[in-house]
Amino acid sequence: MKRVGIGTRVLNFIIDTVLVFIIGFFAHKVNYFYAYYYHSLYLQFYIWFYIALVVYYTLFEALFKRTPGKWVSFSKVVKNKGGKPSFLQILIRSLVRLTIIDCFFIPFLDKTLHDYLSKTEVVEA
């Protein structure tokens, strides 16, 4: 079980963030249409982005142990000692990603905050 490096993590982040942005953008446009024509509740883009982020990571990592970004880089999420992470661990990972300080823990913990709190790691597949 070999942990992936920072470069791989950055590649995963860029690919997944672009996909989450696209999903959030289309959800926002659909919401804008309904809000404009049917006077339903309107939510700002950033709210749709955060919703898309949590749903995207939770679904992909719970079902497949990897996101499209991790598929490209041949990596996956496992528990600290190996094995498939529980749904609660995946949910914790997804929710902690909403914090801005997540990546600033790498120099201190040698991993991101969402990995540390959920007791998971990203390893080569």
Image (cartoon, helix red, strand yellow):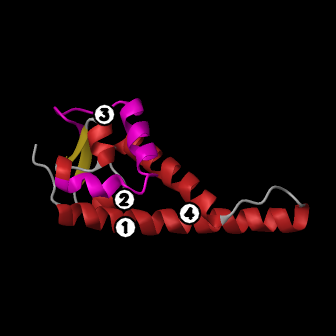
Q: Amino acid at mark 3?
A: Pro
Residue 50 or 70: which is nearer the viewer?
50
Find residue 83 and report its image quarter: top left
Task: Write down the quadrant of residue 114 in the picture.
Answer: top left
> Residue 24: image x %, image y %?
58, 63
Q: Is residue 54 left or right of residue 104?
A: right
- The kind of residue tagged 1 is Ile
Q: Quadrant of the N terminus?
A: top left
The earlier-in-sequence mark between 3 and 2 is 2
Q: Which residue in the protein does label 4 denote?
A: 23
The earlier-in-sequence mark between 4 and 2 is 4
Against 15, residue 91 (above or below) is above
Query: Left or right: where does residue 75 sit relative to residue 27?
Result: left
> Which residue position is annotated with label 1?
15
Closer to the chain start, of discs 3 and 4, is 4
Distance Cα–Cα, label 1 vs label 4: 13 Å
